[in-house]
Image (spheres, rainbow, N blue to C red):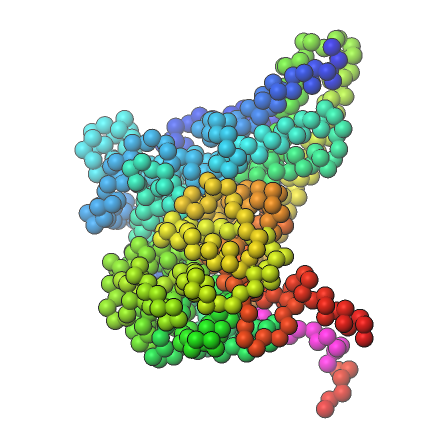
Amino acid sequence: MSDLPKPEESLSKLDHEPPRTGWMDAPVDIRKGMYCYSANPKSLNYTGFPHAREWNPIEDDWKLPENWQEILHRGFRERLDRFRSVKVFMDICVRCGACADKCHFFIGTGDPKNMPVLRAELLRSVYRNDFTLMGKILGKLNGGRPMTENVLKEWWYYLFQCSECRRCSVFCPYGIDTAEITIFGRELLNLLGLNIDWIATPVANCYRTGNHLGIQPHAFKDMLDFFVEDIEEVVGVKVEPEYNKKGADILFITPSGDVFADPGTYTAMGYMLLFHYLKERYGFDITWSTYASEGGNFGFFTSHETMKRLNSKMYAEAKRLGVKWILGGECGHMWRVIHQYMDTMNGPTDFMETPVNPITGTVFENAKSTKMVHIMEFLADLIKHDKLELNPRRNDHLKVTFHDSCNPARGMGLLDEPRYVINNVCNNFYEMPANTIREQTFCCGSGSGLNAGEDMELRLMGSLPRANAVKYVHEKHGVNMLSCVCAIDRAALPTMTEYWTPEVDVTGVCELVANALVIPGEHDRPTDLRGEDLPGWAEPEREETDAE
Amino acid sequence: MRLEGLLEKHKRVIVNKWFDAVVHTYPADTARFLKSQKDPFANPVGRTTFKGLDGAYDQLCGEMETEMLAASLDPIIRIRAIQDFTPTQAAGFVFLLKNIIRETVGDQLREKEGLEELMALDARVDTVGLLAFDIFMRCREKVYQLKANETRNRVFSAFHRAGLVADTPEDGPETNKTIE
């Protein structure tokens, strides 16, 4: 009980403002619930990261290599030379504060060091001190400070309290992308073996077996085969997905979260039903891969090289199978990597064709370099050309809103396609307030590898602005379903809603599509893909039973 | 003037002071933001806190209905229960109200009746404080439950999908069936 404050201390803490210490001098206080466990050394070794070791963030000794300052300084220098963006972002911020209150982690935690400007300043202060003449002469007067162990711990703590969502960058008059600063900072931390396990182990797994959980190809296929059985039970139709089919027209890649975690699994069943429908109606030829079994790319949260390595696996598989183009499922950062980085890392892709929708003839010019089309673009195109038989009444028990996932929304401008699709498969759609959607969407609070269990408080605080908007549409319109197009959202948002708005459930958009899709040869479908009764659909059957 | 009338007359001042005091349990830069940004979607902590305090004050001065009080306090405490506060700081903001009321209307109270009325009000504030603590505990329990559920679901799902979980047959134990 010795850590309890004395009664008089409790009351005085209640009455008074926290001490006003300059941010540079306030020592970092690493709090439980706010950080993720350190990386398993085995995982770091597997992908060749240096200084893999057991260490604990809340212990004083982080077992740093002896010359850690030199390693960091050299790493900083190399990246300033390599990435002009980093140099520019270090130099041009005028600290206007436009970004300060735009971060969901600042809004939720109330911790000023989560203001994007201040989070970046943690790095800029060292940059000024070590790499600018004025900083070297004026030191602290010029906002510079030397790299110490406390500063390093502060970097680690706050760089893993940023989900790289880029909301702050929307408001920066200079166009500084603070996510890039986090990416750069995390890359530096990796030089010292300071990653978190929720990122390092999925990266190693993905590199080895092709997906975050380390599921091997046969188990991946088994999982999809279970879905075939579930679909047959609900719809009365046996779908026959193709696996690793050489010469297929299209390769389908989606995050493995859709295959292994609820409610993403229903989204995966949605894809399977859609492909079955298209095959029956139009001879659509698409294959899953049990090797490129992960769209997600946690390398993106690690280093540019790791991101490139993981991204290349998808393209290697496309080449091996000889497909014409790749269709990508509902994923977040997979799309950010494809849209913003892939082309200069592993592209331009010269062994596939500019994607053409074989059913409508639409040429996806926007994807002519990456050869990868988002399933929402593909679906919107099919619906626009009236190629899907849909019965949106089957979703009438739902009042749906849409969470723009940060990466597809801000990272690639996918704003209208999901809405167009939802409005065609649902009759009750309600938008959240304007400053919480589209380009200004709030992060789920668990992006960029932060959706672990041990940092639950951080995740819940980060999700508060999103949850607050969900609560508003729930109270105003009775919204009971939050749709999204990202697997991390589907994994993280159910926990968020359970804490903040328990009346609202979470779904992928393709689940809504599949529930509305009229499948040739289907039997009566009194339930949705989750096996839950559809109000109004089961009743006639029950009446008949009663009459008997 | 009787305390009841004074509390009603000075409601705006008292609630604003209470809000100010709660907001200043946050760092100075944050407190400035929580006070100045009026958009509830840009500043959910500040606006939720204000709305909740306003509602709780009405109940404290009126019917003291537990459900209504909880509806006002829950959103504030739900936020503070996961922020960087001790339990005292997360739930104890209720008690700040005692001093604020004394500072604002204390000198306008008649000596004897005033003291009695203040004591009665203090008892009400204490009741609200205890309710706040119950809500705080409920929120913390929820956080632990969410952590446990995520872990359980992850492990259970993996076992289930690997075919390692044998579901209970609907038609009774295997031993009761005739082997064909």
Q: Residue at x 48, y 74 (%)?
A: A276
- Would you place residue A180 above or below residue A331 in this image? above
Q: Main secondary structure of the magenta part?
A: loop
Q: Residue at x 66, y 30 (%)?
A: B55
- Would you place residue B140 above or below residue A359 in this image? above
Q: Residue at x 77, y 82 (%)?
A: B176
Q: Position of residue A120 (x, y in %)?
A: 34, 39
Q: Quadrant of the C terminus of chain A?
A: bottom right
Q: Position of residue A391 (x, y in %)?
A: 56, 64
User: Which residues make up the magenta segment?
Assistant: B159-174
Q: Is residue A49 left or right of residue A221?
A: left
Q: Residue furthest front?
A: A386
Residue A371: quadrant of the picture: bottom left
Q: Position of residue A374 (x, y in %)?
A: 39, 61
Q: Is residue A205 visible?
A: no
Depth order, front residue of A66/B143: B143
Depth order, front residue of A373/A108: A373
- Would you place residue B54 above or below residue A266 in this image? above
Q: Residue furthest bottom?
A: B180
Q: Is residue A497 left or right of residue A31?
A: right
Q: Is residue A514 left or right of residue A296?
A: right
Q: How many marks?
A: 0
